[in-house]
Image (tube, helix red, strand yellow):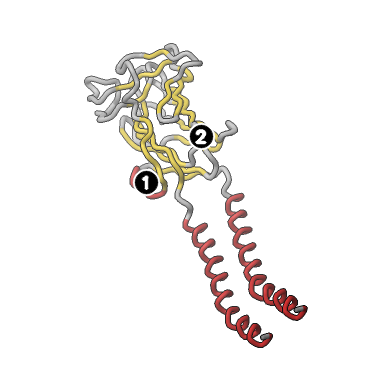
């Protein structure tokens, strides 16, 4: 019996201990990658590429906003909420803080520079808006509308309200485009700041939120660790059976 216990102990070590080191190394490498990529963002300027890199759905299209095509002055304690996103005006100089939703139309019927086929959130005056996310997503995307002034500035915050990134929107003046971002840390809030909105509006539409798809490098590293474990198991299976038969 003593021989059997000792043999079992040695057999367990020979079978499983070789797997521990590769698993620890793979875990360590993944941890290092995560640590190095903290607070890193990737910006997308077209929807198909963003969709390929994320799992997101449209959660806010402003259909429920009322009244549309009219200034809605929002006190600080009563912002507009849709799809787990809180939309708040920071200021709307030279006017009081407000939100304004443009329904589909053309520049002849709206204050946008281009035709729009969706509800667009904007403001009377300069558009300085906050978007606060209840679900703390790692991927956010939305349609964007610019005017002929300085490009809008988008500031991204984490859930501790620390700045993750500040981005000048790289979109042509007087156009419709798309802005998407993935982050290695959860996104708590985004800030949209544009100027000369009292002349021609800027705005946002169709908010998508969700998660970023894991990077191929991380998946490949995990797969390599798993493959090495499997190879060691196969190599160690035959000697283990031989030892067992010898003991018996």
Lateral position of residue 11 relative to residue 110, left or right: right
Above or below: residue 43 compared with residue 59: below
Q: Mark 2 against mark 1, which lies toward the viewer?
A: 1
Disc 2: which residue: 156
Disc 1: which residue: 51
Q: Residue at x 34, y 21 (%)?
A: 65
Front residue of this view, candidates 197 and 180: 180
Which quadrant of the rendered structure holds the C terminus? bottom right
Determine which of the numbered discs, if any, sits on residue 121 in the image. none
Q: Which quarter of the figure has residue 169? A: top left
Report x, y in % for residue 192.
45, 28
Q: Earlier in the sequence, mark 2 or mark 1?
A: 1
CA neighbours of label 1 inside 10 A, class few (<14), some (14 to 19), many (20+): some
What element does badge 1 sit on? helix
Instruction: Name the residue at the bottom extreme.
Output: 246
Measure how far apart labels 2 and 1 are at the Cα level. 20 Å
Lateral position of residue 3 relative to residue 32, left or right: right
CA neighbours of label 2 inside 10 A, class few (<14), some (14 to 19), many (20+): many
Lateral position of residue 38 relative to residue 91, left or right: right
Q: How many marks?
A: 2
What element does badge 2 sit on? strand
Q: Residue at x 54, y 71 (%)?
A: 230
Q: Which quarter of the figure has residue 206? A: top left
Q: Residue at x 34, y 35 (%)?
A: 172
Front residue of this view, candidates 26 and 232: 232
Q: Which quarter of the figure has residue 171? A: top left
Report x, y in % for residue 199.
34, 18
Report x, y in % for residue 186.
53, 39
Above or below: residue 166 compared with residue 63: below
Report x, y in % for residue 91.
47, 17
Q: Residue at x 67, y 73 (%)?
A: 12
């Amino acid at each position: 019996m003593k021989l059997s216990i000792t043999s079992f102990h040695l057999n367990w070590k020979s079978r499983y201990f070789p797997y521990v080191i590769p698993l620890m190394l793979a875990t360590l490498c993944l941890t290092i990658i995560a640590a190095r990529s903290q607070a890193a963002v990737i910006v997308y300027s077209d929807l198909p590429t963003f969709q390929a890199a994320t799992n997101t759905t449209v959660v806010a299209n402003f259909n429920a906003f009322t009244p549309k095509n009219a200034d809605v002055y929002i006190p600080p304690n009563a912002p507009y909420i849709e799809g787990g996103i809180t939309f708040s005006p920071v200021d709307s100089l030279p006017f009081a803080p407000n939100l304004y939703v443009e329904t589909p139309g053309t520049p002849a019927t709206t204050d946008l520079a281009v035709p729009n086929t969706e509800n667009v959130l904007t403001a009377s005056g300069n558009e300085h808006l906050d978007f606060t996310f209840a679900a703390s997503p790692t991927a956010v995307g939305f349609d964007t509308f610019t005017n002929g002034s300085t490009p809008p500035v988008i500031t991204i915050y984490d859930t501790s309200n620390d700045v993750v990134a500040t981005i000048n929107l790289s979109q042509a003046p007087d156009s419709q485009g798309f802005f998407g971002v993935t982050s290695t840390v959860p996104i708590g809030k985004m800030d949209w700041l544009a100027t000369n909105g009292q002349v021609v509006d800027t705005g946002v539409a169709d908010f998508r939120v969700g998660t970023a798809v894991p990077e191929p490098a991380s998946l490949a590293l995990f797969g390599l660790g798993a493959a090495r474990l499997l190879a060691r198991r196969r190599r160690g299976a035959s000697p283990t059976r031989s030892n067992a038969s010898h003991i018996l």
